Image (cartoon, rainbow, N blue to C red):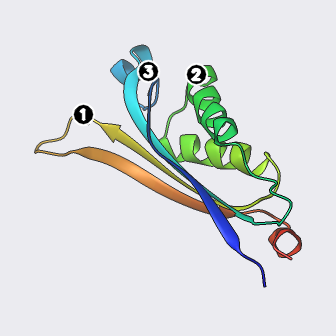
Amino acid sequence: MTDRLCVSLSGMRFHARVGILAHERELPQPLEIDVDAWMARVPTGDVLDYRGLYDVAASVVATTELLYLEDVASRVADGALALGRVSRVRVAVRKPHVALAGPLAHAGVVLERDAPDVSHRDG
């Protein structure tokens, strides 16, 4: 039997330049990111350090100007899967304060991605 463990970080808040409009490219805007990373639990106590997941998200928004929330989610997913032992990742990115014609809490995207060799990681 293989247990699957999910390490979850919710509500990480950053400021980033994300968007296609001129003002979105000039001024950093708030972003919220959630990351869920699944891995097989092993009896040796080998765990995924959630600080690494946080660092991945922080690095993506700090070092890159991106056009779309989808790009942020994709790069965070790539970084999480590169940490090792992660077989699946779910990344949600939300952008509060989007200027639309009516009330809106946030715009957002959710990306789910499996590691390319997921069948080998979970036993």
> Could you say where residue 45 lies in the image, as x and y percent from the top left?
80, 57
Q: Amino acid at mark 2?
A: Ala
Front residue (pair 61, 100): 61
Q: Which amino acid does the dot numbered 3 rest on?
A: Arg
Query: Dividing the image into 4 quarters, which one contains the N terminus?
Result: bottom right
Q: CA distance from mark 2 to mark 1?
A: 20 Å
Q: Earlier in the sequence, mark 3 or mark 1?
A: 3
Q: Earlier in the sequence, mark 2 or mark 1?
A: 2
Q: Which residue lies under the disc numbered 2?
A: 62
- Residue 87, position as x, y percentages in the image: 75, 64
Q: CA distance from mark 2 to mark 3?
A: 13 Å
> Which disc number belongs to residue 97?
1
- In the rendered image, which residue does mark 3 sit on? 25
SS at circle 1:
loop
Mark 3 and mark 1 in contact? Answer it, CB < 8 Å: no
For the C terminus, give its image quadrant: bottom right
Tell me how far mark 3 sits from mark 1, CA to CA.
15 Å
Taking 21 as reference, is 46 left or right?
Answer: right
